[in-house]
Amino acid sequence: MHTLRFLGKALQDLKKIDLPFQKIIKEKLLILAENPENLKNNIVKLIGTKEDYYRLRVGSYRIIYEKQDKELIILIIRIGHRREIYQ
């Protein structure tokens, strides 16, 4: 099981999202922490970044995160709508 950690900007992003979508995103994050293999169809490694960033698709929203396997941490970097998240 991985530990979820959020950057301050990611928490701000999450608070701006409507409550029903927040609930769905939180459920997916818990699944991601317990067993990332269950979401492997919705996870893609981002190209063009120095770090090992990944993208988790949750409906129209995207969660950008970094996986630190040595420490079993998933660092949530940004959460946002697919139109805005990659800018």
Image: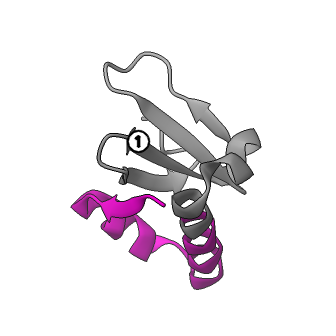
Q: Position of residue 26 (x, y in %)?
A: 55, 73
- Residue 1's x, y, as percent? 48, 61
Our reading of the magenta stretch's main secondary structure is helix
The residue at 56%/76% (across/down) is 22
Residue, far bottom: 19
* Residue 5 vertical position relative to residue 57 in the rendered view, above or below: below
Residue 67: quadrant of the picture: top left
Decide if residue 46 is on the left or right side of residue 76: right
Image height check: is 55 above or below 20?
Answer: above
Q: Is residue 11 rendered magenta in the image?
A: yes
Q: Is residue 28 above or below residue 82?
A: below
Task: Name the one closer to the observer, 16 or 69.
Answer: 69
Q: At 43% from the left edge and 58% from the top edge, which residue is drawn? A: 2
Q: How many marks are shown on the rendered structure?
A: 1
What is the residue that sits farthest to the left in this orientation? 8
In x, y percent, where is residue 72? 37, 51
Between 70 and 18, which is closer to the camera in this rendering?
70
In the image, what residue occupies the spot 55% across and 40% down? Answer: 55
Instruction: State the quadrant of the C terminus.
Output: top left
Give coordinates of residue 42: x percent, y percent.
71, 44
Q: Which residue is mark 1?
A: 67
Q: Locate residue 41: give its quadrant.
A: top right
Amino acid type of the residue tagged 1 in the rendering: Lys
The magenta stretch spans residue 10? yes
Residue range corresponding to the magenta coloring: 1-29
Q: Secondary structure at mark 1?
A: strand
Q: Left or right of 13: which side holds 45? A: right
